[in-house]
Amino acid sequence: MINRVLIRLKIVQIVYAYYQNGGKNLETAEKELFFSLSKAYDLYNYLLLLMVEVTKYANKRIIAAKNKLKPTKEELLPNMKFVENRFIAQLEVNEQLSDFVNNQKKTWSNEPECIKALYEKIINSEYYKEYMTDETSSYDADRELWRKLYKNIIFNNEELDQCLEDQSLYWNDDKEIVDTFVLKTIKRFEEKNGAKQPLLPEFKDEEDQDFARRLFRRTILNADYYRHLLSESTKNWDLDRVAFMDVIIMQIALAEILSFPNIPVSVSLNEYVEIAKFYSTGKSGAFINGMLDNIVNQLKKDNKLTKN
C-alpha cells in the first residue's frame, strides 16, 4: 500500500524535523520514518473499518426505532438493504482486518459523533436513496454503493479529516493518499474470496522498503555534497536566503537523482516539484524545478550523472 509518493512525502517531513531538532541522531530519525509509514498503514485499515462501523450504527438506529414505545409501521418493517450489504458483511469478517483490530485494539467506538455525522450525510445522499429504492439486488451493486459513498462522501471530508487528526498527528497529511488505496481495495473485492480477500500489503515489496531507507540515509549522509551543488547553482545569492523547506526538498531530490539510476530524472523532478507546491511557498515549485534542472544539466556535462 505504501507507495513511493507517500515515502517521499514522509522523508520530506522527517528530514525537516531532523534538522529542526539539531540533526543529532540519524538512527532515531530513521526509526521515526518507518514508524510514520506504519501509521499510514494503520490509517488504511482504520478507514476500511469505518465502513463497517457506519453500517453497525445504521443497524443500531433500526433496533432503537423498533423498540420505541409507539413505533411506526416503517420503523417496525424497515428497509434492511443498507445494513445487510454483502460487501460490508464480507469486509467485517475479513481475516486481515480482524487481525488489525485484535492487534491494534483500534475501533471507532470512541467517535460516536463522527460516525453519526457521516451516517447522516450518507442517508441524505442520492447514492443511498437510489440504492435503497432499487428493487434489484447483487453483490456488485452492494460493493458499488460503497465505492460511490467513499469517493464522494468520505474522500475529502473535512469533518472526518479533523476527527482523524485529533486521533493522530501522523494522519494529517496521509488521508488523501490513503483514500486512493481504500478505493482501490473496494474495487478489488470479490465475493468468492470471502473472509480471505487479500488487502493491500504494507509495502508492495522489499524494494520499496529499501528505497525509503536508502533515500533517507543518502539525503542525510551526503548532505554536504548536495548543498554544495545547490550553492554552486545559486552564485548570485546566498543559499541561506532560500526557504529552508526548499533546500530540504532539493536535497532529497538530488539524493534520489544521484542514488537511483533506474528512476528517470523527469519522474524525480515532477515528484518534488509537486511536493514543493504542497509544503512550501507558491513560487517554490517553479524555483525548485529550475534549480534542479540546472544542476542536472551540469552534472550531465561533467559526466557525474548516470541513468539507465
Image: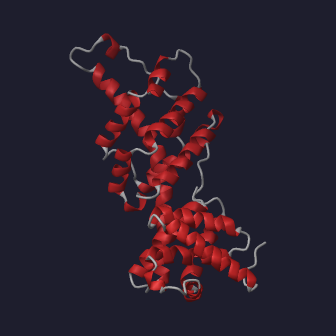
Query: Which colour scheme appears in the figure?
Result: secondary structure
Indicate left or right for 67 with 222 as reference. Answer: left
Query: In the depicted view, which residue is nearer to us: 191 or 228?
Result: 228
The residue under the point 48% across, 58% down is 40
Residue at the outermost front position: 236
Residue 103: x and y, percent?
45, 56
Can residue 206 be seen? no
Quadrant where the image shows the N terminus: bottom right
Query: Looking at the image, which residue is at 48% across and 76% down?
Result: 15
Q: Which of 131 and 139 is in front in this view?
A: 131
Horizontal and vertical percent for residue 215?
A: 60, 75
Q: In this view, does 198 lie to the left or right of 129?
A: right
272 or 22, nearer to the observer: 272
Picture quadrant where residue 173 is located:
bottom left
User: Going by the picture, which residue comes out furthest to the top?
Assistant: 73
Q: How many marks?
A: 0
Residue 20: image x %, image y %? 39, 79
In the rendered view of the protein, which quadrant contains the C terminus?
Answer: bottom right
Residue furthest right in the image: 308
Residue most extreme to the left: 69
Q: In this view, does 74 lie above or below 104?
A: above
* x then y, percent, for residue 123: 39, 28
Instruction: Judge from the rendering whether residue 77 lies leftward or rightward of residue 12; answer left or right.
Output: left
Image: 220 above or below 207: below
Q: Which quarter of the figure has residue 264?
A: bottom right
> Would residue 303 appear left or right of 86 to someone viewing this image?
right
Residue plotted at (44% across, 41% down): 154
Q: Would residue 178 be visible to someone looking at this image? A: yes
